[in-house]
């Protein structure tokens, strides 16, 4: 993946039965319209089959274990080396739903990102302020401490996804000046830890928002949740990056 190309990440979360996912990907492959990098994050159950079936498309994992073991008695866990063996090159770490529902701490997110890097998998590390920090004007300090705690210092490539918690699934897109102010800051801070990094935005990205984000130099792409499940909407998002 070249850094100059923009990146569109489709986070399918716990959606898309295998059959529906394949129908979507088949249509997508046939649409043959992408000049950006598109990365699908399907359910872990489906990654292997999809990787084999759609060799022109890219797939990553929504998660991986934080344990520093490649294998063992850890029911339900998936190690970075298992992902690597399948040819998975990207793994998301610390999505706010994992932090919220599964109580993942910054320490856990760091361990996941480190495991990914050690297995030559590019981590997509999610950070974002909650509504309280935003209202109190503490967004920058909240992000700074998350970055410090979650992003390993590395020469390898990493992706940071800026996802304000109040924007995810809420249909609320941040004002342009807010996004520019925060992302310029984030970019600068991330660069200190990892020179080879990309910054993407996530949270209520639809076709209209994507058109706008595609023109912002400080963003290297988007992370799309809900709209990545709707084929026509997702195609519009991809086209706006053409
Ligand atoms: P959304 O989700 O696009 O539905 O807001 C984004 C995400 O959760 O990553």
Image (tube, rainbow, N blue to C red):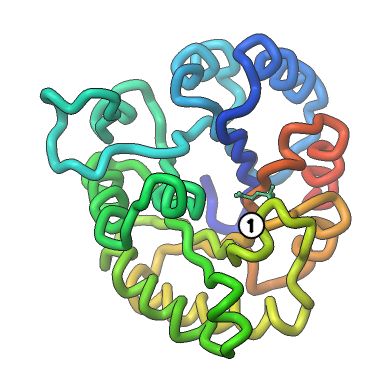
Looking at the image, which residue is at 32% across and 64% down?
A: 150
Q: Residue 169 versus residue 222: which sits nearer the camera?
A: 169
Badge 1 crowding class, 10 Å Cα cut-off, few under 14, some 14 to 19, many 20 or more, is many
Looking at the image, which residue is at 36% across and 52% down?
A: 103
Picture coordinates of residue 147, whole percent (x, y): 38, 71
Q: Secondary structure at mark 1?
A: strand
Q: Is residue 175 above or below residue 237?
A: below
Q: Quadrant of residue 174?
A: bottom right
Picture coordinates of residue 179, whole percent (x, y): 68, 76
Picture coordinates of residue 116, whole percent (x, y): 30, 44
Q: Quadrant of residue 109?
A: bottom left
Q: Residue 237 versus residue 120: which sits nearer the camera?
A: 237
Q: Residue 194 versus residue 163: which sits nearer the camera?
A: 163
Say whether residue 67 is left or right of residue 217.
Answer: left
Looking at the image, which residue is at 80% across and 46% down?
A: 237
Picture coordinates of residue 25, whole percent (x, y): 69, 21
Residue under numbered circle 1: 202
Q: Is residue 215 above or below residue 136?
A: above
Say whether residue 40 is left or right of residue 156.
Answer: right
């Amino acid at each position: 993946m070249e850094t100059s190309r923009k990146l569109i990440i489709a986070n399918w979360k716990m959606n898309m039965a295998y059959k529906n996912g394949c129908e979507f990907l088949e249509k997508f492959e046939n649409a043959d319209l992408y000049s950006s990098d598109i990365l699908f994050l399907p359910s872990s159950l489906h990654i292997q089959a999809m990787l084999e079936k759609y060799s022109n498309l890219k797939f990553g994992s929504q998660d991986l274990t934080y344990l520093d073991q490649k294998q063992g008695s850890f029911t339900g866990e998936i190690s970075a080396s298992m992902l690597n063996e399948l040819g998975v090159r990207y793994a998301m770490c610390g999505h706010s739903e994992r932090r919220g529902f599964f109580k993942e701490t910054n320490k856990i997110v760091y361990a996941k990102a480190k495991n990914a890097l050690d297995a030559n998998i590019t981590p997509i590390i999610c950070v974002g302020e909650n509504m309280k920090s935003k209202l109190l004007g503490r967004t920058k300090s909240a992000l700074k401490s998350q970055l410090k705690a979650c992003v390993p210092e590395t020469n390898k490539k990493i992706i940071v996804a800026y996802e304000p918690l109040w924007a995810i699934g809420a249909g609320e897109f941040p004002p342009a000046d807010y996004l520019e102010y925060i992302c310029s800051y984030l970019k600068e801070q991330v660069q200190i830890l990892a020179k080879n990094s990309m910054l993407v935005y996530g949270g209520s990205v639809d076709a209209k928002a994507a058109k706008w984000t595609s023109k912002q130099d400080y963003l290297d792409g988007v992370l799309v949740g809900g709209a990545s499940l709707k084929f026509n909407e997702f195609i519009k998002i991809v086209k706006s990056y053409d």
